[in-house]
Image: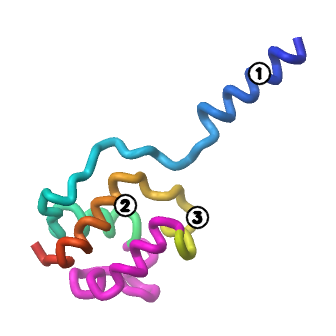
């Protein structure tokens, strides 16, 4: 009975223990990533609650573009993980942001 109980706990940890979502969609950097429809909404959803009044300010294209590498490092967890005290962004959002940078951080 103890073995069955331990096995159930282990299965629960494996199935429900990971807080980071896996990529719900495949991102292809050959497709244009729109700042207006992809990047700004991402910033508005996950960043603006803190970064409209705390440095770095991330309210517009100019601010986001100027801080893009630091943002990418933070959302990847390479530096202090952002969003602060929240779960890491899913892989597809991180890859969208990375593609937007690779495409020249366009204001499109």
Q: Residue at x 34, y 52 (%)?
A: 92
Q: Secondary structure at mark 3?
A: loop
Mark earlier in primary sequence (1, 2): 1
Q: Which mark is residue 31?
A: none
What residue is shown with label 2? 94
Is 99 in the magenta? no
Q: Is the N terminus in the top left, top right, bottom left or bottom right quadrant?
A: top right
- Give the answer, above or below, for where 58 lies relative to 26: below
Q: Quadrant of the C terminus?
A: bottom left
Asked if the magenta segment contains residue 73, the reply would be yes
Q: Could you tell me residue 39's position as x and y percent?
A: 25, 67
Q: Is residue 20 above or below residue 15?
A: below
Question: How far is disc 1 from disc 2 in space, using C-alphas?
Answer: 34 Å
Q: Position of residue 66 (x, y in %)?
A: 30, 88
Asked whether, in this view, residue 90 is left or right of residue 1, the answer is left
| Residue 2 placement: quadrant | top right
Q: Residue at x 37, y 61 (%)?
A: 94
In screen coordinates, is 57 left or right of 11? Answer: left
Residue segment shown in magenta: 48-77
Q: Which mark is residue 85?
A: 3
Query: How many other residues sit within 10 Å of disc 3, few (<14), some (14-19) or many (≥20)?
Result: few
Q: Secondary structure at mark 1?
A: helix
Tell which of 18 and 48 is nearer to you: 18
Residue 60 x %, y %: 24, 81
Which mark sits nearer the N-terminus, 2 or 3?
Answer: 3
- Position of residue 15 measured from the top left corner of the image (x, y, whole percent): 60, 31
Residue designated by label 1: 7
């Amino acid at each position: 009975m103890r073995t069955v109980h331990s096995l159930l706990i282990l299965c629960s940890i494996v199935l429900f223990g990971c807080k980071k979502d896996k990529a719900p969609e495949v991102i292809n950097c050959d497709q244009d990533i729109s700042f207006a429809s992809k990047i700004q909404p991402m910033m508005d959803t996950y960043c603006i609650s803190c970064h409209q009044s705390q440095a770095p300010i991330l309210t517009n294209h100019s601010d986001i573009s100027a801080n893009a590498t630091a943002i990418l490092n933070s959302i990847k967890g390479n530096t202090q993980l952002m969003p602060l005290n929240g779960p890491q962004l899913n892989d597809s959002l991180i890859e969208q942001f990375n593609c937007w940078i690779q495409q020249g951080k366009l204001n499109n």
